[in-house]
Image: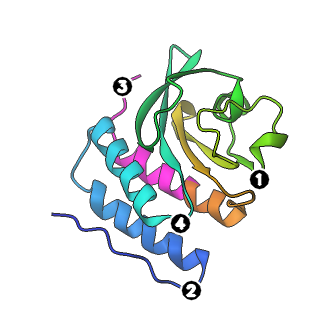
Amino acid sequence: MFQAKVIESGGKTEFYLDLTLQLASLLENERDAIANAANTAALLFELMPDLNWAGFYFLRDGRELVLGPFQGKPACVRIPVGRGVCGSAVAERRSMLVEDVHAFADHIACDAASRSELVVPLIRGGEILGVIDLDSPMVGRFDEDDRRGLEEIAAIYVAASSLAH
């Protein structure tokens, strides 16, 4: 049985190296996308400090994101592509790092306590399958090191999972 190990490294580079190794071990030999998303969200929520939400949205019919496995308070179920931080990440085909969600003109507030957000698209063969979304109650919680780290987490998740199109 997998047991998450508290990461006690000095910096973010070491933190994400350890986190990616733990995730790869956790997802090893499992191909189910939902099971892997659930375990990925749980691992992120447990090991990353200062989060109030960690989870997945999956792209459906190329038009909207639908809530997947997550940890945190109940969330918005459907987000149109192009709306909010998650929908913008899909429309722009890039990661979105928002230091203060109150300064993001089209932010969708699922949890009023969220102040910063990091969203990374899940991409396989050039096709966007969904996003990983992290929220924090702290302004400026995420930086470029977090973006790069979460992009690696997304790549590990996509490589391990069989996602239906």
Q: Amino acid at mark 2?
A: Gly
Give x and y (percent) for residue 48. Answer: 50, 64
CA gap between label 1 and label 3 equals 33 Å
Is residue 62 visible to us here? yes
Residue 106 in magenta?
Answer: no
Which residues, given as a range, are shown in magenta? 151-165
Q: Earlier in the sequence, mark 2 or mark 1?
A: 2
Q: Earlier in the sequence, mark 3 or mark 4?
A: 4
Q: Residue at x 33, y 37 (%)?
A: 33
Q: Earlier in the sequence, mark 3 or mark 2?
A: 2
Q: Residue at x 59, y 32 (%)?
A: 110
- The residue that label 1 is drawn on is 99
Q: Residue at x 46, y 34 (%)?
A: 74
CA gap between label 2 and label 4 equals 14 Å
| Most frequent secondary structure within the magenta stretch | helix
- The residue that label 3 is drawn on is 164
Is residue 88 visible to us here? no
The quadrant of the rendering that contains the C terminus is top left
Q: Earlier in the sequence, mark 1 or mark 3?
A: 1
Q: Is residue 106 above or below residue 14?
A: above
Q: Amino acid at mark 3?
A: Ala
Total of numbered circles in the picture? 4
Q: Earlier in the sequence, mark 1 or mark 4?
A: 4
Q: Are marks 3 and 4 in contact (CB under 8 Å)?
A: no
Q: As drawn, is 2 to the left or to the right of 61?
A: left
Discs 2/4, front: 4
Query: Which circle marks residue 19 in the picture?
Result: none
Residue 162 in magenta?
Answer: yes
Q: As drawn, is 37 to the left or to the right of 139?
A: left
Q: Residue at x 37, y 32 (%)?
A: 163
- The residue that label 4 is drawn on is 49
CA gap between label 3 and label 2 equals 39 Å
